[in-house]
Structures are given as structure tokens and as C-alpha cells.
Amino acid sequence: MPELDLDISVVVPLLDEEESLPELGKWIAQVMEKHKFSYEVLLVDDGSRDRSWQVIQTLAAENPCFKGIKLNRNYGKSAALNTGFKDAQGRVVITMDADLQDSPEEIPALYKMIVEEKYDLVSGWKKVRHDPISKTIPTKIYNAFTRWFSGIKLHDFNCGLKAYENQVVKNIDVYGEMHRYIPVIAKAAGFKEIGEKVVHHQARKYGTTKFGGLKRFIRGPLDLLSITFVTRFRKRPMHFFGAWGIVFFLLGFLGASWLIIDQLWAVYSHAEMGTPVTNRPLFYLSLLTIVIGVQLFLAGFLGEMMVVNSPQTHEYVVAEKIGIHPDNPPINSNS
């Protein structure tokens, strides 16, 4: 892995946050200068319709450490984070929301946990939240379910304030709405040193939340099931589909075999045909499971062919960049 010139990259995904950006930018700069960090702030505009991009241009003009990435439309928070991760050049990558609910004062402690305590990822825990009960109760339920399902002992998976060792963000792919499960993705990629820090949560100062909404509570369990399947079987779909295909095929085969043996025994012991095999419900059930087993096995085979010939990518159209060299090399632990 190449040496990194910057201590910290701060990646801030945002959507329609023109009011909070000037205050956030000033706050981050004060913290960085106080602790003498070398840094960059990547402000990723996820298709804002207000003056957010103009504010980003002003911040970049006033401070060369501030850089902007503008997506051509609204793709969602995962896309904004993934785009920022590609250009992040700091040894430690910090993510935070643009609404001033995440405090930049937490950055030095998060940085220390990555650099000195050797965590791969540290997730913030908003132990005391300033959100309505309609948001906090579902969040607690989802966090409990994700802890149980993933085995990762975090209290707040969806906290926007997180810190990463650089190679973590360069070796994970965040798409769809998977930003809630980045610790799960990181663990599946082999980054198992995952820690947690209690962070201060502030009440929202301007406007209302732009990312999320009621639909996130519907999509949350589906996202978790999806990421679990993808991380375990993306490179080996035959292990999933093939295994279940064999199970269904064997169940059907055993059912059909039992019917045939039972029919032959009836003929041998009673010298009579008994109930024809084709008149028994188990015959059709066995036939169905055999067909399902063959189909699952073929699905696994086709999946293996797709993995070999069609590597998966998730690209987003970047309309404009400020302060980011177009030839920034990707920093990858495999390079």
C-alpha cells in the first residue's frame, strides 16, 4: 500500500444543505487546524436542487483543503459515499452528515482509535439521540436485529459518523442503500477490527432530513438479507444454489424411490398392483422437488458463469469536481 500524504479525509454526503454547509465547513477547519492535521474535506453533492453546489464552490475557493464532487442527479447516500471513497487520499477516512448533527469535535478521538488502537473501522454510537420517537424506536429494533443477524456488536449501525482505515474504503463497494450496513460489508471483506465510540448527537439546526424516510424501514430488512447473501455468495453462487438444488433433488428422488419400492412390495407381498403411483399426491410432489432441484443447480451454474465473465461494478455519473486531480490513483491494499 502506498504512503499517504494526508492524515484525514472527511467525506460528507449531502443533499440540499446550503444553510448548514458554511457553518460545518468552518467547524471542521477549526478542529483540523487546532490539532494540526493535514486533511481534505470531500463534499459530495448528491443532486441538490438548492444552492449547495454554489456554497461548495465558495468553500473550495476560500480553503484549498475543501473539495467538491457533484453527481448529475440524486442517487442516494450510498452512491455519494462510494463516490467520495474513491477519491479519498487520507490515511484515515471520516464520514459525517452535513446537517450539523454530527460533531467534528469527535474527529481527533476517532483518528486516534484507527491510528493508535489499530481498528479497521470505528462506528459512532448516538447513545443520547435528539430525534422523534417515530425514528428512535424503529432504529433500536433494526440495530438489535442487525446485531443478532450479523454478529457485530454495535449499538448504532446507521450512525453517519464513522472512521475507517483507508484500505477499508478502497476495498468495499457501497451501493443501493447499503450504507446502513457498511460494518457488515467491511467484516465480510476481512476487516474484523470493528470498534465503537459514543458520540455527541445534536438536534438538527436547519430544515429536515433529506436522506431516508419511512421507506428505509421497509427496505432495511431486505437490504440486510441482500448484503448477507451478496457478501457470502457473490463469488461462489454455486455454493448456495447448488447446495439447495442437491437438497431438493435428493428429497424428490427419495420420495419417488419410496413410491416405487412401496409399489413393488405391494405386488410382491399381495400379488396386486394397489394404488397406481401416478394417483398418489407424493408422486407429483416428488416430481416437483426434482424439477426445482435441477433449476436451482442450473441457476448456480449460470451464476458461476456470470461471475467469471461479468465482474460487477456500480458507477455513478459525476457531473463536476472541484480541487480533485482527475488522475488521482486509487489506493488499494492489493496494489
Image (cartoon, helix red, strand yellow):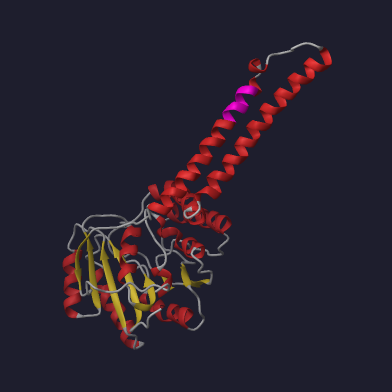
- The residue at 34%/85% (across/down) is 37
In the image, taking residue 15 as reference, residue 90 lies left or right, namely: right
- The residue at 50%/69% (across/down) is 191
Q: Residue 253 or 147: which is nearer the viewer?
A: 253
User: Residue 305: horizontal and vertical position, in percent?
Assistant: 44, 48
Determine the image quadrant of residue 333.
Answer: bottom left
Magenta part, dominant SS: helix
- The residue at 57%/40% (across/down) is 245
In the image, taking residue 244 as reference, residue 218 lies left or right, namely: left
Tell me the quarter of the image containing the N terminus. bottom left
Residue 201 visible in image: no
Highlighted magenta segment, given as a residue range: 283-289
User: Residue 55: horizontal and vertical position, in percent?
Assistant: 18, 69
Residue that protrudes farthest toward the top in the picture: 272
Residue 16 visible in image: yes
Count of numbered circles in the view: 0
In the image, taking residue 147 as reference, residue 29 lies left or right, namely: left
Q: Is residue 224 magenta?
A: no
User: Residue 234: horizontal and vertical position, in percent?
Assistant: 47, 53
Q: Residue 264 or 146: which is nearer the viewer?
A: 264
Q: Is residue 251 above or below residue 159?
A: above
User: Residue 264: horizontal and vertical position, in percent?
Assistant: 76, 20
- The residue at 49%/61% (across/down) is 184
Tell me the quarter of the image containing the C terminus. bottom left
Determine the image quadrant of residue 38.
Answer: bottom left
Q: Residue 79 or 167: which is nearer the viewer?
A: 167
